[in-house]
Amino acid sequence: MIRQGIIVVVSSNDKIRNIISGLLKKRGYSIYEASDGASAIRLARSLKPHLVLMDFNLVGAGAYNTARIIEDDNLSSVIFITSNPNKNFIELLKNMTIYAYITIPINPSQLYQIVEFSLINSSKIKELKIKVDKLENKLRARKKIEKAKGIIMRMYNISEDEAYTYMRKKSMDRCITMEQLAEEILKDKN
Amino acid sequence: MRKRYSKEDVLKISKDLGVEFIHLQFTDIFGVMKNVAITIEQLEKALNNEIMFDGSSIDGFVRIEESDMYLRPDPSTFVIFPWATQVREARLICDIYDKNGNPFEGCPRNALKRVLKEAEEMGYKFNVGPECEFFLFYTDEKGNPSLVTHDNAGYFDLAPVDLGESARRDMVLTLKDMGFEIEASHHEVAPGQHEIDFKYDDALMTADNIMTFKMVVRIIAQRHGLHATFMPKPIAGINGSGMHTNMSLATLDGKNVFYDENDELGLSKVAYNFLGGLIKHSRAFTAITNPTVNSYKRLVPGYEAPVYVAWSASNRSPLIRVPAKRGNSTRLELRSPDPSANPYLALATILKAGLDGIKKEIEPPTPVNGNIYNMSGKERKEQGILSLPSNIYEAVKELSNDEIIKEALGKHIYDRFVDAIELEWKEYITRVTQWEIDKYLTKF
């Protein structure tokens, strides 16, 4: 079965990188490789991969900083690879989108399982994030429109429904969203 | 525009927005930004000018026995970093004071303030708008900067996206978040070279902005896996990075005094005298506006950088150009400075040169409207056109002969600056370069 998914494998250790890439290629994923933090970021920016697997022991800016940039800028989700999952590591792991990691030496069935789970979880989390963002934006817009409506009601001494109809008409006439119109009304008032 | 924050505003905003770290920033003589990081608990102490640091650990500052220095944050420079950090961070730009409470004469920001005060006493405000160029390079597999740009990196990154373009877009958005008004942003002539222009402001604000700008460009480049450099000429044979500086004087209530509608070129007597002062002192302030060995590899014919001391209203090649806009936008554009310059010292010396022109009513030479590069050496000599210094050693020698420009720097900064340059020059001329090996190893 050919599996869907673009994965970037990042490790300064050629051997580890080759083993992981080889195993994942066999399973049908599209694999891209980087050997340092900066090129991992460049690949993540240009490919927007579904997942980044990153050796926690990385040359350059350091794995955690690199992973933070990749997740903060919504480029992908990062799964660390480590031979030493100590307390400090586990503490940092809590800040990541997906709470999972891969251990060295590589155990193929563990690798496959974590990658598969992470791909599914990551796409679910992404969908939820988009939904939350949308709702937040809507809520913000609603608040502005409510405020602006209040101003219009007082200004023209009209009912709530009339004020809403007035604003809708105005925004349609000018081909702008009601949010933009509301912003203008609020700005004028200030 | 500068925000009118008071001490109380800074404390309140920091608390409301949950700022945890504050970077107290200042600039050393060589234009490198320094940081003293404090936690929110120390912010009030900092705003009361009670934070001390060891000046002897900073390049070109002081000797061990006078090392206690105080930082005085300027509340109007308060800004919260908009990029993602682990905890919320902000910064304040500081002036440096000695332990007796006097402005420290080795602080470049104080030096600029001194000259600005002189201008203010003459009734002028100095407005400056920079056009800053820089290169974005790739890093190698060890994370070290290389000279490879996106334009010739095809062998590794298969990107359909131009990483440099997307980094620059991110820089512009970040700068806007920090209150910058961006006027233009584009890919420059050379591969990997970019330019971002922001709106003019009073000189102190602009110098602060240039330092902030360089910091933002570096940080955002890093977040894109790229290395940003303001080195004036990183690659021989292609254009270097300049920092063209647009400037004008205004009355204290903001009216441009460079404009005179009755003049043939639309320039006032003040403008002509300011220009005269710039021309007269240009060979001396070049050491400050172009302060590295590498700077002079940019100031050569053929790459859009100025070489000759001349001015023109019509062509783009001379040292000083008068852009076509008139009225309140009347200005002079000095084309020699490069982004390795310390912006505080560069603007202090440029302004000092112009003010000297006004005080002594120095007339500028006649404008040169032809292409100077096409003239022979004899023609240039007949017209009295000098060249800019051809290396940093010559530039420092010119500086040492100009008491006006030295006064703008102050003795402390001047002495430290010259010492450092002489050291750097000695280091440079004792090197045997690859060019020499290629040229002479088999020939002799």
Image (cartoon, coloured by chain):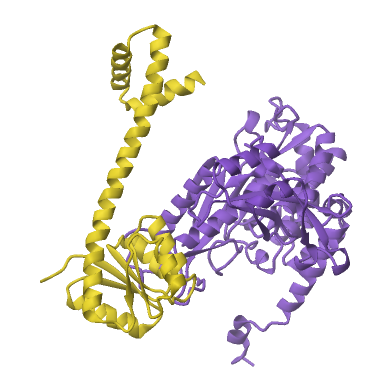
Chain letter for the part of the structure drawn in purple? B
Left or right of B66 in this view: B293: left
Of the pair B220 and B52, the residue shown nearer to us: B52
Residue A113, quarter of picture: bottom left
Residue drawn 75% across the image and 58% down it: B288
Image x and y of residue B120, in percent: 81, 35
Q: Is residue B333 visible?
A: no
Residue drawn 20% across the image and 71% down it: A29
Residue drawn 44% across the image and 61% down it: B224
Residue B200, quarter of picture: top right
Furthest residue to the front? A87
Image x and y of residue B415, in percent: 85, 63
Image x and y of residue B117, in percent: 82, 40
Where B67 sits versus B21, above or below? below
Residue drawn 63% across the image and 83% down it: B436
Left or right of A26 in this view: B44: right
Of the pair A174 and A57, the residue shown nearer to us: A57
Furthest residue to the left? A1
Chain A colour is yellow
Left or right of B335 in this view: B277: right
Quadrant (top left, top right, bottom left, bottom right) of the N terminus of chain B:
top right
Image x and y of residue B289, in percent: 71, 56
Of the pair A2 and B331, the residue shown nearer to us: A2
Q: How many marks?
A: 0
Where A16 sits versus A138, above or below? below
Quadrant (top left, top right, bottom left, bottom right) of the C terminus of chain B:
bottom right
Q: Is residue A20 visible?
A: yes
Of the pair A8 and B85, the residue shown nearer to us: B85
